[in-house]
Structure formats: C-alpha cells, structure tokens
Image (cartoon, grey):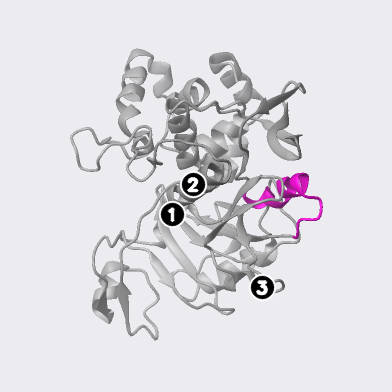
C-alpha cells in the first residue's frame, strides 16, 4: 500500500524539511512515505489480541522438547522459568515461530536438520531530538559498506541506525559492539550539521534479525540475504515459520496456518488476520485518538489510563523527570500487559531503557525499585 506518491525535492526544499541537515554537497532529495511503529508495544498488543481470540499466552516459559507420538510431533514440553515447574501441551500440530531460535527447535524435530537461520544484528543509537529538526526522517541508501542509514524522530528522541552484522549464534540479550556504535556515529555525522559524539548517545540497543539462508547462500553477506519468510514442514510434522519482518507478520501467520492445516488434514474457517483489528485499535484523527503523545501507544485504552490518573493522583507522577509517561503506565503494564519485573516495565512496556539509559538505571535503583514494589507489587 502506498501512503502517498514519492517525488523529487530541490536542495532548498530538502533543507526546509530537515533544517539541520549537512548542506555541503547536498543536491536535493527524494521524499517518500513510510510507517512507524514501536516493536515492543506491537508485540504486547498482538499477545493481548491473541488472548481475546481464545489463545492461552504464557510469559517466561521455555520449550525443552517436542512430544512425539507415532513418529510425529504432537506437542511440547516446557518449563515455567519463574517456578521451575515443567509442563506438557499436546496438539494436532506444533508451529515453530521462534525467530532467531528457530533452528534450536528444528533440531528437536530432526537432529540432522541443516542450519536455516542466520542471525544478523542491527544496532540503533538514540540521540536528543535537537539533532533532527522538523518531522521528516533521513534515509541514506548507501553508507561505507553499502548498508542503509536511518535518522528517525521516535518517541520524542532521534533514533539512528542500523547495522547488519552476521552473528555466529542467536543471543537472547544482544548488545551493541563498540565497532557498530562507531560506524553509526561516523556515518550519521556526514549528514547532520551537528556531528554526534559518543557522549551524545542517550541509549543504544540491539536486535537480531532471523534471516533465512536459501539453498546456496551459506556464507553470503547478511545484508544481501532476503528478508522474506519461509514456511517449512519437518520430517516429523513440525511446521516452522522462519525469517520475515514486522511488516509482513500477518502474511506470515496466514501462510503458516494454511500449511499447518493442509498438511495435517485439519479443517478450520479461513484465516481472518487480513481484516482483524488488533487490540486497542483506534483510527488516527478520530475523536477517540489520544491527545497526549505518550498515550498514543495505548489506543482505545488511553481514556482508561487518563481516568485512572484522575482517580488516583499518585499515578499521575512521572516515571522519571526525563520521561513523559507516568506511573500509571507501569501499573497498567503489571495489571494488563503481562509484565513480571522492573525490566519488563522499563524496557519493554514504556521503552525507557531504549531511550534513556541513565534515567533507567536511576529508576531501577534499590530505593526506587522498593517504592515501585510496594505500590504495584512488582
């Protein structure tokens, strides 16, 4: 879907859209339109949408093995990592949609399964909003090594990235390397009037993409591997949905479900993901659209948070002086969004950890954490 047609911009118009872009050697630009989202918020929203559709969603669980009956996969063994208790869940089909850890599950199905997923690390740096004036983002199609560079306004800050570094194995908590940070700073500095320094970085974060190696691409640079998804059925019936990206998650779900039904002789109504509105959906610009920016990610639930702050004024206090969101967001995360720890709240519900590292450390201090525990039972 095209949001609006792309068109060329003159040098003067480019500078007007991005006042503090580096003007030296600037000839002009191309304006195109794209969407923006918060990956962690979308993940939480999708989990809650699944619950409303009848799914049982489990947080902090680890798959330990597959249950096989008659030589075919018919369930999973898993552990509740908070209690250490083990459980089993049986079903007509098991779908492996574990991203960078897909190969780990595939080996449970077939110990000889060839490696299919290449983790590729992407790093982003967060700068103060003053580094990018105006509402337009910058996209540089070719950096030193051919990667794309983005400078994007996001949550009142500026996000700069990304890298594309092949990793030898998947990591649960990937961390930016100094080499990646230096690469981003050096390339961003060529396009901004104010060259960012290491001391300007408010936060940095990394993620790993689950790139799928088509046959014959082993050893190819990760930036040249397709971001498309692949659906595979293992020799014992395990259905694996691998690769892909956030922008195609509905198509991935439909393809995975169709394969699971067809190869197991199951009957079900047609997949509804194409038209299903996710939890909290509200049309931008409607009378129900949240008027406060940090509340936008809560969609139709924003009035409930606002009302909660009015009824309990203590919840209207800011999480930290440097962040716009209030304690109501933390309480909401605990009561409605499956948060189980301070890290869940500060990094994955209000995104403070991805925006302000120092403020996050201060908010996780012993004194502050004790206060949160007493108020919200973290």
In the rendered structure, does residue 108 fall within the stretch colored magenta?
A: yes
Magenta residues (range): 99-114
Q: Which residue is mark 2?
A: 258
Using residue 204 as the reference point, say whether residue 103 is left or right of it.
right
Q: Which residue is mark 1?
A: 247
For discs 1 and 2, the disc positioned in front in the rendered view: 2
Circle 3/circle 2 CB separation < 8 Å = no
Task: Please name whichever residue, 326 or 102, is drawn nearer the observer in this view of the structure.
Answer: 102
Q: Does 121 sit above or below residue 50?
A: below
Q: Which is more N-terminal, label 3 or label 1?
A: 3
Q: Quadrant of residue 62?
A: top right
Label 1 crowd bin: few (<14), some (14–19), many (20+), radius 10 Å? few
Residue 287 visible within the image: yes
Tell me what residue is drawn at x 47 percent, y 36 percent: 267
Q: Does 84 sit above or below residue 180?
A: above
Q: Which is more N-terminal, label 2 or label 1?
A: 1
Q: Secondary structure at mark 3?
A: loop
Tell me what residue is drawn at x 60 percent, y 28 percent: 58
Name the chief secondary structure element in magenta: helix
Label 2 crowd bin: few (<14), some (14–19), many (20+), radius 10 Å? some
Q: Which residue is mark 3?
A: 217
Q: Which is more N-terminal, label 2 or label 3?
A: 3
Residue 193 visible within the image: no
Tell me what residue is drawn at x 57 percent, y 67 percent: 184
Label 3 crowd bin: few (<14), some (14–19), many (20+), radius 10 Å? few
């Amino acid at each position: 879907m095209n949001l609006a047609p792309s068109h060329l911009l003159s040098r003067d118009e480019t500078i007007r859209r991005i006042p503090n872009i580096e003007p030296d050697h600037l000839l002009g630009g191309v304006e195109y339109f794209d969407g923006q989202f918060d990956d962690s918020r979308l993940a939480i929203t999708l989990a809650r949408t699944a619950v409303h559709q009848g799914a049982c969603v489990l947080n902090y669980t680890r798959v330990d093995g597959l249950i096989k009956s008659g030589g075919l996969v018919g369930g999973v063994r898993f552990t509740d990592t908070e209690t250490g208790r083990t459980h089993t869940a049986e079903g007509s089909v098991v779908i492996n949609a574990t991203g960078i850890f897909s190969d780990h599950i595939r080996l449970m199905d077939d110990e000889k399964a060839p490696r299919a997923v290449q983790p590729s690390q992407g790093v982003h740096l967060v700068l103060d909003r003053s580094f990018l004036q105006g509402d337009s983002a910058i996209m540089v199609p070719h950096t030193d090594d051919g990667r794309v560079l983005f400078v994007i306004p996001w949550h009142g800050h500026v996000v700069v990235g990304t890298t594309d570094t092949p990793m030898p194995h998947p990591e649960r908590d990937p961390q930016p390397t100094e080499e990646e940070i230096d690469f981003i700073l050096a390339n961003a500095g060529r396009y901004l009037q104010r060259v960012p320094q290491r001391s300007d970085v408010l936060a940095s974060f990394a993620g790993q993409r689950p790139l799928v190696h088509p046959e014959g691409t082993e050893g190819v640079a990760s930036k040249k591997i397709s971001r498309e998804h692949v659906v595979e059925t293992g020799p014992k019936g395990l259905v694996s949905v691998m690769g892909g990206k956030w922008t195609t998650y509905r198509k991935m779900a439909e393809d995975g479900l169709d394969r699971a039904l067809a190869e197991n002789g199951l009957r079900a109504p047609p997949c509804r993901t194409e038209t299903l509105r996710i939890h909290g959906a509200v049309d931008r610009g409607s009378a129900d659209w949240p008027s406060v920016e940090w509340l936008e990610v809560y969609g139709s639930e924003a009035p409930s948070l606002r009302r909660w702050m009015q009824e309990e004024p203590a919840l209207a206090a800011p999480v930290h002086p440097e962040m716009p969101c209030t304690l109501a967001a933390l309480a909401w995360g605990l009561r409605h969004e499956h948060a189980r720890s301070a890290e869940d709240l500060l990094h994955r519900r209000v995104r403070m950890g991805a925006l302000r590292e120092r403020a996050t450390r201060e908010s996780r201090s012993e004194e502050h954490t004790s206060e949160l525990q007493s108020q919200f039972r973290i």
